[in-house]
Image (spheres, rainbow, N blue to C red):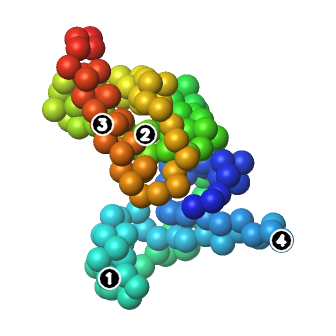
Amino acid sequence: LFHTTSEKITVVIHPQSIIHSMVEYVDGSVLAQLGNPDMRTPIAYALGFPARWESGVEPLDLFDIKSLHFEAPDTDRFPCLRIAREAMIMGGTATTILNAANEEAVAAFLEERIPFTMIPEIIEKALENVTTRPANSIDVVLEDDANSRAYVGRLLSVDVS
């Protein structure tokens, strides 16, 4: 997805979790990767790359599926989708800042220091307050990752409830 503009990415909700990715080609055709909704498949792929390992997952039976369902995402219900698209449009290290802020906010949620619903607010504050720069070197990316984590750390050290 490097060098891909936000306009070329469409988020689709597929509640059945059978289609794991899709790519649309210039001729309008779509290539989809389908499989049973079982995390053993992507884990085996990640561990065995570039080879494909036996995952222990039953093969997908297309006759059992009958139909596939899709929905447009609700950005009111899932505000982080909107925030991620805004970060892509901002460019530079904005997506790095978003990712670092998200990781820190999720960690705080898992430690029961913040409610789940506060995660998007923390990410937005990081994007508003951590300076975005052109991502022209790994050093800049790593610095802005650290800057975002430090900002969120300071933010969470204040009473956030």
Give the class, few, some or many, for how many residues have Cα within 10 Å of label 1's Cα (few <14, many ≥20): few
Whole-angstrom CA distance, mark 3 to mark 1, is: 32 Å
Q: Pointer 3 and pointer 1: residues touching (CB < 8 Å)?
A: no
Query: Which mark is nearer the camera, 3 or 1?
Result: 3
Whole-angstrom CA distance, mark 1 to mark 4, is: 32 Å
The answer to which image quadrant residue 41 occupies is bottom left
Question: Tag 1's secondary structure?
Answer: helix
Query: Which mark is nearer the camera, 2 or 1?
Result: 2
Is residue 142 shown above or below 49? Answer: above
Res 48 label: 1
**Residue 28 locus on image (x, y percent):** 81, 66
The amino acid type, in three-letter code, at marker 4 is: Asp
Is residue 29 shown above or below 138? Answer: below
Mark 2 — residue?
97
Whole-angstrom CA distance, mark 4 to mark 3, is: 43 Å
The amino acid type, in three-letter code, at marker 2 is: Ile
Query: Which mark is nearer the camera, 4 or 2?
Result: 2
The answer to which image quadrant residue 87 occupies is top right
Mark 4 — residue?
27
Label 2 vs 1, first from the N-terminus: 1
What residue appears at the point 30 percent right and 36 percent down from the top-left corner?
149
Q: Pointer 4 and pointer 3: residues touching (CB < 8 Å)?
A: no
The amino acid type, in three-letter code, at marker 3 is: Arg
Frontmost residue, 126 versus 30 = 126
**Residue 58 locus on image (x, y percent):** 36, 77
The amino acid type, in three-letter code, at marker 1 is: Gly
**Residue 63 locus on image (x, y percent):** 55, 73
Whole-angstrom CA distance, mark 2 to mark 1, is: 30 Å
Question: Tag 4's secondary structure?
Answer: loop
Label 4 vs 2, first from the N-terminus: 4
Mark 3 — residue?
149
